[in-house]
Image: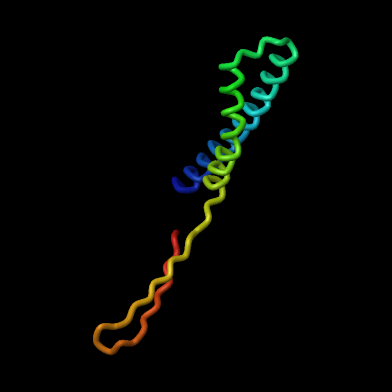
Amino acid sequence: MWNKMKAIYNQIIKYTLAIFLILFFFYMLLVLIVQGIEGKLDPLNFISVVAVALSFPGIVQTLADEVNPKKKTYKLSCKCPKCKHLIQMDMKEE
């Protein structure tokens, strides 16, 4: 029961973070548009907003990896020291 509650809590946190990032992105675009129209676009504000805009795809990719993690498969092969037979093993993340 605790594992199920923990999984639900984690999903809620992840979706809340996704909604926050989407709202932050739209706020960033709104600030850029409004300040550009008013002519008050300070160079420092412009640089910081553009830096956030350029890093936004990386933030989204990190969030997507958190929400839907991909399990890796590792393959190991080596020869037995005694009989020289090739041993192969597959390992998967859980």
- Which residue sits at x=71%, y=10%? 39
Question: Viewed as shown, does residue 38 lie left or right of 67?
Answer: right
Residue 91 point in image, percent of width and height: 42, 68
- Which residue sits at x=43%, y=70%? 75
- Which residue sits at x=47%, y=43%? 6
Given residues 41 and 82, the one toward you in this image is 41
Given residues 6 and 84, the one toward you in this image is 84
Rendered image quadrant of residue 74: bottom left
Question: Viewed as shown, does residue 1 lie left or right of 45?
Answer: left
Assign the C terminus to one quadrant of the image.
Answer: bottom left
On screen, residue 26 above or below 65: above
Outermost residue, front side: 43
Residue 81 point in image, percent of width and height: 25, 83
Given residues 32 and 88, the one toward you in this image is 32
Residue 56 point in image, percent of width and height: 59, 35
Outermost residue, left side: 82
Residue 54 point in image, percent of width and height: 60, 33
Scheme of colours in the image: rainbow
Given residues 94 and 46, the one toward you in this image is 46
- Which residue sits at x=44%, y=45%? 2
On screen, residue 31 above or below 78: above
Rendered image quadrant of residue 20: top right
Rendered image quadrant of residue 86: bottom left
On screen, residue 47 above or below 94: above
Question: Viewed as shown, does residue 85 lie left or right of 18?
Answer: left
